[in-house]
Image (tube, grey):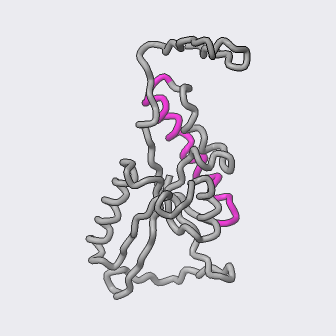
Amino acid sequence: MAACAGDDDANGATETPTATTTSLASTDETFEFQYVCVNRTLLPCQVVQEFMDAVNERTNGRIEIQLSSYPELGISGLDTISLLKDGTIGFGEIYSGFVGGEFPVFDVANLWGTFGNLDQWFAASDGVADDILRIVKKEPDGGEVVGFNYYSSQYFSPKTPLTLWRTSAMLRPEATVRSLPT
């Protein structure tokens, strides 16, 4: 999921929209943003880079979005929500596996082994999108969800049930292996 923080100033005041709007084409202003993704090597981050390049091109360079990643900024992702809230990150990817403790509904996408195939997983993940939007909008610190990414490469669904090989280490009582129903 991608989200952006509010545009509050240091005093917590927000700008009130005016009745008139000005198109970007009629102004000489430029805008710079930084987008933080989990890792540049991941496909969703590369797709976002292509989008940012297209925005820059279509606005003749007046909107520039720089791409950074968690590793480049020295952050783990576990604190993404708080970094968005306090303005440290203005625009970025929230990986559900990192923030499920703060927003348990995000963990629906990370119930590994629950779904029989990728289509079921995608349907469940997509099925909670409206709930995620509703829950995030309730947050007093603002922010806005601007899109969802789905990392299907993390999931696999075997055609036949997996069999666990038991080793002598697994036979100890503290290492009991339980089979999941198929």
Query: Residue 48 at what x, y percent from top left?
Result: 37, 57
Q: Residue at image x 52%, y 26%?
A: 115
Query: Residue 88 at what x, y percent from top left?
Result: 58, 70
As for residue 127 lying within the magenta part, the answer is yes
Query: Residue 102 at what x, y percent from top left?
Result: 68, 50
Q: Nearer the viewer, residue 82 or 140?
A: 82
Query: Residue 135 at what x, y percent from top left?
Result: 65, 52
Q: Residue at image x 62%, y 57%?
A: 79
Quadrant in which the C terminus appears: top right
Q: Residue furthest front?
A: 168
Dominant SS in magenta? helix
**In the figure, 137 relative to 23: above or below?**
above
Horizontal side of 48 relative to 9 (left or right) equals left
- Please identify the quarter of the rendering in which residue 45 is found: bottom left
Q: Residue furthest right?
A: 173
Q: Residue at image x 45%, y 36%?
A: 154
Q: Which residues are magenta?
A: 116-142
Q: Nearer the viewer, residue 116 or 169?
A: 169
Count the labels in the image: 0
Q: Nearer the viewer, residue 161 or 118?
A: 161
Q: Nearer the viewer, residue 67 or 3?
A: 67
Q: Residue at image x 33%, y 85%?
A: 26
As for residue 42 lying within the magenta part, the answer is no
